[in-house]
Image: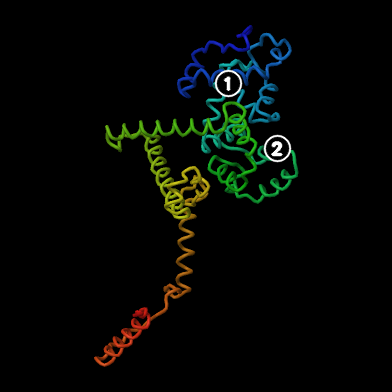
Amino acid sequence: MGGVLSNQVPVPDERMQQMITKLKLTAKDLTVLYGKFARYDKEYLESAVESSGTIDRTEFYASIDEKHSPFGDAIFALIDEDNSGVLDFSEYVEALGKFCLLNKEDMLKFCFNVFDDDKNGTIEGQELTNLLEILHEDEQTSNMKHALKTFDFNGDGKIDFGEFKQLHSQFPSLLYPAFRIQQNMKIFTLGEKWWERKIEELASEHYEKLAQQAAAGNVEDMSDEAQRARKEEMERTAKQKRQEQAARMRMGCLYYTCCPCRRKLYVIEDDESSDSDSDSDEERARRKQKAAATNVKKGGKKQNIVPVGPRKPLSQEERLERARKRRLRDMQDRPTRKD
């Protein structure tokens, strides 16, 4: 792919064409991406006439303002099938399309595979500690090491994927370099907002397709992945409705209607719509037991209600006296007419 002019986007091969179709990249998008790609090509910078059409790992890290890390190397290993140590523009676009579209669950699986060198489905505790030295080069490493020793690995000294997700919930900074690389890849290519819109667009199309399949056939005939995606869509829709209702209550109907651009400032993440796996069935059961115990301590009654006995019926004289006082009060409030 050498000898390509700086303002000419290379002709896409089959792999690149598939990613263009998937992301619905326009000619303008490809021009922007190739401009970013060629900007960090050493030969292009030196000759200022034509580029080699490839970037190495150092140039790739420079293009996203990142330092060398195991996660970046894993991206290269995932895309660079010929192990040439360089990426051409086709591989560059494919790397962006695959890595920038990963959600939180997929990112955790990717990081787990990076840590799991022998791919046996478990990570040794010492192996994870050694990787911390590479990922974190500041004072947080020693603190995290001490915290890892107190983490419960079910007594087997190994970490499976479920424990790995719990580890991420307790120590989010552990995998921060991986999520930062993903964020920088979005920022320094087409922009973070562009990628967010694209992710939302692709998710909507995917859920719409699943809904059509569910409407055409029986729900029981759907695959596990389709049922999981359908459940996620229902949860996402319910979460969005809850957030909209909460924002409308905080803003007021008039402000909510007249200023739609400011609604996102009043949107907060609720616990029920959180995608964290730490909120398990055991955790919800524990909260219910705690609430029940608190209710028992209070005698099973709400403390903010004042007990009131039955009202004594009024006699005929008392009712007439009350009516007379009400008429006098109304007469006092009525303005006097001036003749």
Q: Secondary structure at mark 2?
A: helix
Where is the N terminus found, in terms of image quarters? top right
For residue 194, above or below residue 305:
above
For residue 130, above or below residue 62:
below
For residue 37, above or below residue 275:
above
Q: Which residue is mark 2?
A: 130
Residue 54, quarter of the rendered image: top right
Q: Is residue 85 visible?
A: no
The residue furthest left is 316
Circle 1 packing at 10 Å, graded few (<14), some (14-19), many (20+), is some
Q: Secondary structure at mark 1?
A: helix
In-front residue for pair 329/255: 329
Residue 62, quarter of the rendered image: top right
Horizontal side of 1 relative to 16 (left or right) equals: right
- Amino acid found under the numbered disc labelled 1: Val
As drawn, the label of residue 32 is: 1
Structural distance between the alpha carbons of marks 2 and 1: 39 Å
Horizontal side of 113 relative to 229 (left or right) equals: right
Q: Is residue 184 visible?
A: yes
In-front residue for pair 102/248: 248
Horizontal side of 116 relative to 253 (left or right) equals: right
As drawn, the label of residue 90 is: none
Q: Give how far across and how far down residue 326 sits, in percent.
A: 32, 84
> Of callouts 2 and 1, which one flags the residue occurring earlier in the amino acid sequence?
1
Q: Give how far across and how far down residue 82 sits, in percent.
A: 60, 15
Horizontal side of 159 relative to 216 (left or right) equals: right
The residue furthest top is 3
Q: Give how far across and how far down residue 230 sits, in percent.
A: 38, 38
The residue furthest bottom is 317
- Amino acid found under the numbered disc labelled 2: Asn
